Amino acid sequence: MIRIQLEHLDKHFGATHVLCDFSLDINPGEFLVLLGPSGCGKTTCLRTVAGLEQPDAGCVLLDDRDVTQLEPRDRDMAMVFQSYALYPHLDVFENIAFPLRVRKLAVSYVERRVKEAAERLGLAALLRRRPRELSGGQRQRVALARAIVRQPNAFLFDEPLSNLDAKLRVEMRAELKRLQHDLGVTSLYVTHDQAEAMTLGRRLAVMKDGVLEQIGPPEEVYSRPANLFVAGFLGNPSMNFFPGRVDAAARAFASEGIAVDLSPEPMARLTDGASVTLGVRPENVELDRQPRDGWIPGRVYVSEAMGNENLVVVRVGEHSLTCRAAPEMQLDFESPVWVRFRPDRLHFFDTSTTKALWP
Ligand SMILES: Nc1ncnc2c1ncn2[C@@H]1O[C@H](COP(=O)(O)OP(=O)(O)OP(=O)(O)O)[C@@H](O)[C@H]1O
Ligand SMILES: [Mg+2]
């Protein structure tokens, strides 16, 4: 198990600043997920770790050894891509065996390793098929088998599940997590899918425009996002945001059509008159059909039944907010409702710096 450290990486493509003073420390055996929107530099980061890109500045360390100048083959990392990158003219067996054949390992050893990997990924019956005779999920398994067959230093995953349909993606996600746990190989997994990011990694790093925004266990990044970007990017549906102002005398937060009582705790982290943005996740908005004291009146814009829950979009003045309601809560368009934000689950952000305000 190796440790991977990225230290102050900087990378430009022409005028685009793709990695900005980017540092990341991946512990031995850890499964770290790097999450960010399209074009933020995830693939570039991964390719820099693999040695397929050279940074303009900064270095990559493997077990404290500077490998920045080392060729990809000397870093011994297995990359798994979204596109699978299988050899179409080779059958499944030979595709999996490829990294071992290149090393000219003994035939009997290759046979044993390929069979083990194929067994592990449920491909034993498909060894003589060509890639074009496989489903997308089976192809992705072949790509994974090829990655594990040679016992690499690390796995580098670049959105390996995004070409699969929704059901298969969820299945493979769980299998991948188990596989990495069983093999214990240090892994860096990049994705723009926040569900993958939440479920797969023991730690989650969120990036935007080449900058690392926050890193921590997924639950922590979800419950204590460092800024507006992280808060809005994690969670589906997204956190609701209301820009407004703090009124210390009234111990309240006010936004157009919305007033929230801030006694007693949140006031401690807020200053009078400050421009702050209130954030509330949909699961922390309570909803009732009856008027209730201190609750905010609104109207149903639309209600979407998901089976296990209803996602209700409520209009309050100029604002639109989403809440998760019980599946029994059937609501017509425009029906009057009252909402309340769970007082112990309020997020506040400085509107100008976008940074979270915590006690
Ligand atoms: N070889 C290249 N030449 C020029 N620009 C590039 C090159 N590779 C990437 N870029 C640019 O660098 C930025 C980051 O690209 P990168 O592929 O790392 O993003 P990403 O986070 O992996 O995005 P996606 O989620 O869409 O895969 C983008 O603006 C992209 O257009
Ligand atoms: Mg990419």
Image (cartoon, helix red, strand yellow):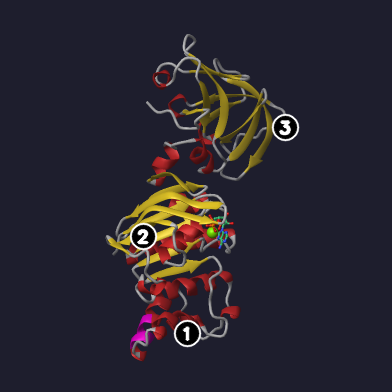
Q: Is residue 54 above or below residue 275?
A: below
Q: Earlier in the sequence, mark 1 or mark 2?
A: 2
Q: Amino acid at mark 3?
A: Phe
Can you name the residue that lies furthest to the top here? 249
Identify residue for label 1: 94
Question: In what element is the residue under mark 2?
Answer: strand
Identify residue for label 3: 333
Q: Is residue 38 above or below residue 353?
A: below
Dot 1: within a 10 Å radius of its alpha carbon, few (fewer than 14), some, or many (20 or more) residues?
A: many
Which x, y percent locates residue 245? 54, 19
Q: Amino acid at mark 1?
A: Glu
Q: Name the one closer to the observer, 8 or 298.
A: 8
Q: Amino acid at mark 2?
A: Val
Identify residue for label 2: 60
Q: Name the one closer to the observer, 324 or 274.
A: 274
> Which of the four quarters of the rendered structure image does ligand 1 lie in?
bottom right
Which x, y percent locates residue 307? 60, 45
Instruction: Let me know if residue 319 appears in the view.
Output: yes
Task: Read off the magenta span.
Answer: 109-113
Q: How many marks?
A: 3
Dot 2: within a 10 Å radius of its alpha carbon, few (fewer than 14), some, or many (20 or more) residues?
A: many
Task: Tell me which residue sits at (51%, 53%) in the image.
Answer: 18
Q: Is residue 154 left or right of residue 287?
A: left
Instruction: Tell me the quarter of the image containing the C terminus.
Output: top left
Question: In what element is the residue under mark 1?
Answer: helix
